[in-house]
Amino acid sequence: MSMLELRGVSKSYGQGSAEVHALRDVSLTADEGEMVAVMGPSGSGKSTLLTIAGTLEEPTSGEVLIAGVSVGKASRGTKARLRRRVIGYVFQDFNLLPGLTAAENVSLPLELDGLSARKARVPGLRGLQRLGLGERAAHYPDQLSGGERQRVAIARAMVGDRRLLLADEPSGALDSANAQAVMRMLLDACKEGGMTAVVVTHDAQLASWADRVVFLRDGTVTDQTAPAQGPEILLTPERNQ
């Protein structure tokens, strides 16, 4: 079953001679348990694709379906519930709330969905521990490094029973060791937990973890392919010995 489907999606900004076409007739599917990487040069429409897939922005034309349901005519409340319960989003600039600790930032989506702060804290702490941040749970964002804030944002996007993860350059602020740990966790969530992930990246090694790589240029899908070898071949030294 397709967890995410974009059908002929286009997005334009401005009018007349000032009109800019960010996406042009893009069609894309991501099935349950599948990781799809999206690559392309700056300005190719990658981030716009994610914001539309995540219901943060409306397409100019075309249709977006999540778990087989078209979201084009959904109310603002319905879309908000989708973002709380189904969609996890990793932003390039983290979007952490400065007045909340790392643990509070991660557990916030669960609290907004009605879980008590005490109960929401348990999966929040578990997510931080999986990313090596258990000892930083009580720290505020301005007390964390860029890489640590990125990992907090990833933990927040995956907390609870999220079924669709949309990640915009999730390894951008991470060193190679932490990037590898994050991709292992995403891969496990897809293959063992059935989560679907769409990951925008400039990093060919990160893209090698995906089941499929989609290439964008000038707002158009130009090609898509599967990596020739699995991620362990490229990123785990002992596999090459």
Image (cartoon, rainbow, N blue to C red):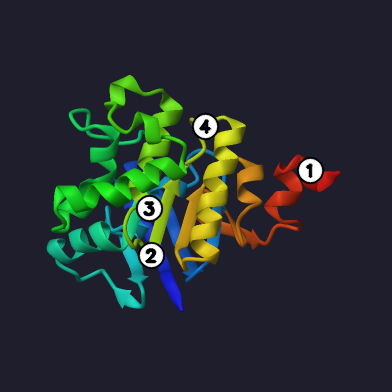
Q: Depth check: give the residue in front, 140 or 196.
A: 140
- Residue to which mark 4 is pinned: 174
- Residue to which mark 1 is pinned: 238
- Residue to which mark 3 is pinned: 158
**Type of amino acid at the residue the image marks with label 1:** Glu
- Residue to which mark 2 is pinned: 163
Crowding around mark 1 (Cα neighbors within 10 Å: few <14, some 14 to 19, many 20+) is: few
Q: CA distance from mark 1 to mark 2?
A: 32 Å
Crowding around mark 3 (Cα neighbors within 10 Å: few <14, some 14 to 19, many 20+) is: many
Which element carries disc 3, helix, strand or loop?
Answer: helix
- Give the residue furthest to the top: 143
The earlier-in-sequence mark between 4 and 1 is 4
The earlier-in-sequence mark between 4 and 3 is 3
The earlier-in-sequence mark between 1 and 3 is 3
**Type of amino acid at the residue the image marks with label 4:** Leu
User: In which quadrant of the rendered view does residue 55 lie?
Assistant: bottom left
**Type of amino acid at the residue the image marks with label 2:** Arg
Q: Depth check: give the residue in front, 172 or 161.
A: 161
